[in-house]
Image (cartoon, rainbow, N blue to C red):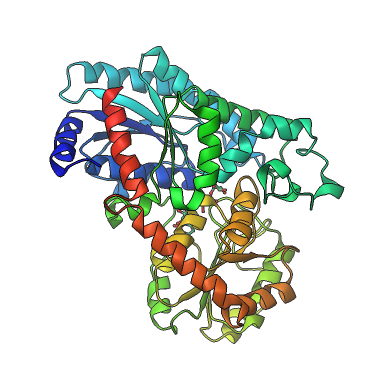
Amino acid sequence: MQTTNNLDSKMEQSKGRRLILCPLPFQGHINPMLELANILHAKGFSIAIIHTNFNTLNPSTRNPNFTYHSIPVDLTETEASTKDLTVVLSILNAKCVEPFRECLAELLSDGINSEYPIACLISDPLFNFTRSVAESFKLPTIILRTGCAASFAVYITFPLLKKKRLLTNTGSRLEEPVIELSPIKARDLPTMPNCDAEDLYQLITNMVNESKASYGLIFNTFEDLEGHALATIRQEYHPNIPIFPLGPFHKCGPTTSSSSSSLLAQDQSCISWLNAQAPKSVVYVSFGSMAKIDQAQFLEIAWGLANSGQPFLWVVRPGLVQGSDWLETLPDRFLKALNKRAHVVKWAPQKEVLAHPAIGAFWTHCGWNSTLEGICEGVPMICTPCFGDQMVNARYVSDVWKVGMQLEHGIERGEVERTIRRLMVEEEGEEIKDRALKLMEAANLCHKEGGSSCQFLDGLVQYALSL
Ligand code: UDX
């Protein structure tokens, strides 16, 4: 382990270096990238953020210590609202490449005479052009993969899964275990709504190839949580590409509200409502920034929650329910009849909510940020994965870490009500709650001196300075 003097001198060296970070412009990717920026800034690096004017970062919540460089991408309204995410990503990739090249050239030419020479680019592998552009300027790229290691281990197995015909037409084989990826079942393999299976395969292959061609791979996870999946990835990548599991990011860096990276305004009324609720009594429900449900599912959720008897805080993001603006499909007086047992908002201060003592369960879509945020606060989860990596995350929550339950048969009010009661009221939930608290302790220990994420962070600092 390093001595304090050693670390101080590393910090002194990093003070002379600059890092450029380039987040993919979606909430679930922006949050971890900016959290990582905070962590590296605290280690002495100067930080430049290249971001797009699509889903642009809110100027009032930007970190005053960073420089921000916006690149223009003219997505038409039709392009931006395309339902197939692989198409949106391919348009973004095509339209960002030249503005990114110009922006990087400018930053590098400014950097030549600057007191802060640029050490490397840290980018998202779904931006599939950033590494090769940086390489053309001889600038090394380290990749931040914002999902968990287990889902990445699934992605690197894609060629084999394709060969075994597990990526398409799995209809009758949904419950089949994928032997190489236990306890993953065929039904847990990544899918995307409204998207062609071959396009998804290509997107994932590109993402894996980008990370394999990079100088290193950072994950927002920690060894005690995902040691097995990390070992699988290391085996595939070793020894050329170092792997840095530095998470959970939001429990490491200085977390001030000024560095909040929320694209939507967070409704603070959640906190005063939670203050009036009994400890561990509230079900917090949120399906993240991208998932969509239909109107029938929306009503099943509403009735399931109401019938559970528990108070609930429900994030209904505008756009969550297909074909409706917000709450208009709820029956008349539905919320009034619940008499303050329900609080519904468009967007919540999620990390604060999950840390609130009134929260007793988190019904989540299992986006990786939400999953990790739930783990960090020891909140047991109910899982309704919707697409992409979420099914793998949910399987790990229910079957590996055993800190939650899945709604295995879709969203139906009776099952919702039963699952909430099983988790929050009945004895069955007790063991899950105990495990969730233990996992929370592990998540908080890994950043302490000598903890795995703390050590990997020092390793990353040294590595970035050596590039
Ligand atoms: C997307 C994909 O859906 C997910 O599978 C992938 O792992 C990352 O990208 P998203 O739907 O945005 O993620 O979910 P998630 O990863 O959970 O990120 C959502 C972020 O928004 C979290 O950091 C959460 O704290 C924040 N959030 C969510 C809020 O601040 N307020 C809310 O009301 C809801």
| Residue 312 in the image, given as x and y percentages of width and height | 54, 76
| Residue 35 in the image, given as x and y percentages of width and height | 35, 46
Q: Is residue 148 visible?
A: no
Is residue 424 depicted above or below 131 in this figure? below
| Residue 209 in the image, given as x and y percentages of width and height | 56, 25
Residue in the foreground of this view, choosing between 300 and 54: 300
Q: Can residue 301 be seen in this view?
A: yes
Q: In this view, does 443 lie to the left or right of 255?
A: right
Is residue 309 depicted above or below 236 in this figure? below
Residue in the foreground of this view, choosing between 254 and 459: 459
Q: Quarter of the image containing the N terminus?
A: top left
Residue in the foreground of this view, choosing between 383 and 293: 383
| Residue 455 in the image, given as x and y percentages of width and height | 31, 43
Q: Residue furthest front?
A: 1
Q: Quarter of the image containing the C terminus?
A: top left
Q: In this view, does 42 lie to the left or right of 209?
A: left
Q: Write the residue at 17% across / 28% down.
A: 16
Name which quarter of the figure residue 336 lies in.
bottom right
Is residue 262 depicted above or below 132 in this figure? below
Q: Write the residue at 66% across / 44% down.
A: 181
Q: How many marks?
A: 0
Q: Residue furthest right?
A: 172
Name which quarter of the figure residue 68 lies in.
top left
Q: Write the residue at 39% across / 68% down.
A: 355
Residue in the foreground of this view, choosing between 331 and 370: 370
Is residue 321 depicted above or below 461 in this figure? below
